[in-house]
Image (cartoon, grey):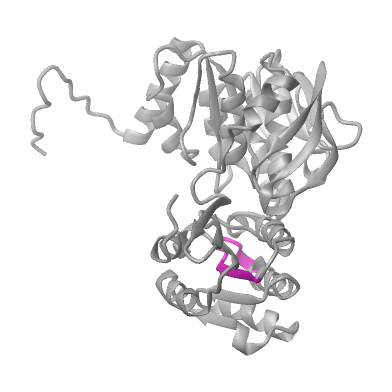
Amino acid sequence: VRLQPPPPQRSLVRVDDPLAAYHELARHERRLRGWQVAAVTGSVGKTTTKDFLAAMVSTSRPTGASTGNRNSTLGLPAEMLSQEPEVEVFVAETGMSKPGELKLLGEILRPQLVLYTRIAPAHVEFFPNLEGVVRAKAELLEWLDADGTLVINADDPNQRGFADEVSARVLRYGAPDADGRIEAVVDRGLLGSTFRLVLPGGEARVKLGLAGIHQAENFLAAATAASVFGVGADEVAEVAAELRAPVHRGRQLTIGNNITLVDDSYNSSPLAVRRMLELLAQAPGRRVAVLGEMYELGHLSVEAHRQAGCEAASCCDVLVAVGAADARTLIEAARDHGMARTSTFLVESAERAAEVLETVLESGDVVLLKGSRGVGLDRTVAAIGGVA
């Protein structure tokens, strides 16, 4: 094959495997830059927790972070190769959809800190059971620096054995006796929460404007990890006032006629749906849920969608299910648990969901939109006037 010459002052390198070569470039960058690396993984809340942690550490150190959810074996190396020269701490979201991917990313990153959010069923289409997911998440542990720190969720039984697999320092968060914990929590629903934050070495009162107690858990995870970098409780409390949910990950929007959208359309899993429905249940006024199908659940898919329909029936006044067979399972379960047919809608696309909302929304409604990325509910948000 005859190749075009490279642009002026550029070189063209021919390799047998472009992805493997890309990984080697990332390894070289890691060695060259000498960062302290914090790797964030788990099943839910990775991107939000990663962003929280980067914001906290940046109060005292030049900090870089992977953007969005670029956490794959392609996206994360690209982020490593795009950091500013002054960066000292690099916060990396690490994701996986099959065994071996976190092993590879761990070998490239060689982190000084590994932080786990909660582990729950996700990508189980590629694993025989939840235990397979847990073992794949544990692949990072062998690459954690022996002088580093492991930060685990003490309230997650799936992480109980992780501390025994490392010689590094271990910090736990989430349980009443953990190193990092929140106390005296006041759940303000869509307005967020207030609580007392307790970290190794200090505590502070925090007002968090992000909807949902699960965001307080994400904040606690990040704050516990940030304490390893010398960031105190008072400093993270100040950061809390500036935090906003990432686009399509629980961000609140207001459209005409005093309608509030909770745009959590980026992705979905059974646990995440349950948490957002619990949040919706606390909202004042009429509650509307637009739930897209949850992908990559394999043999758990039917039961997961049936359960989501049952949960929606207990808290929603209007329900729109988006997709095909699994969406039908969801809507039928909601009807079986008491929702009227006149308040439940099954549609095949994000665009059709927008058309339904245009006809049913009323002043003061609170609307939750959540579904797997492939469903495209961000298009629903845009179509009805939501602006990120």
Is 107 rendered above or below residue 124? above
Q: Residue at x 40, y 71 (%)?
A: 351
Q: Residue at x 79, y 23 (%)?
A: 170
Residue 186: image quadrant is top right
Stretch in magenta:
286-299
Is 172 on the left-hand or right-hand side of 3? right
Is 348 rendered above or below residue 171? below
Instruction: Pick out the residue farthest to the right.
Output: 177
Asked if one can make out residue 141 in the rendered structure from this viewpoint, the answer is no
Q: Tag count in the figure?
A: 0
Residue 291 within the magenta-colored segment of the rendering:
yes
Q: Residue at x 67, y 76 (%)?
A: 317
Is 325 on the left-hand or right-hand side of 25? right
Q: Position of residue 143 (x, y in %)?
A: 63, 24
In which quadrant is the N terminus drawn?
top left
Q: Position of residue 337 (x, y in %)?
A: 75, 82
Is 217 rendered above or below residue 180? below
> Front-most of 251 and 37?
251
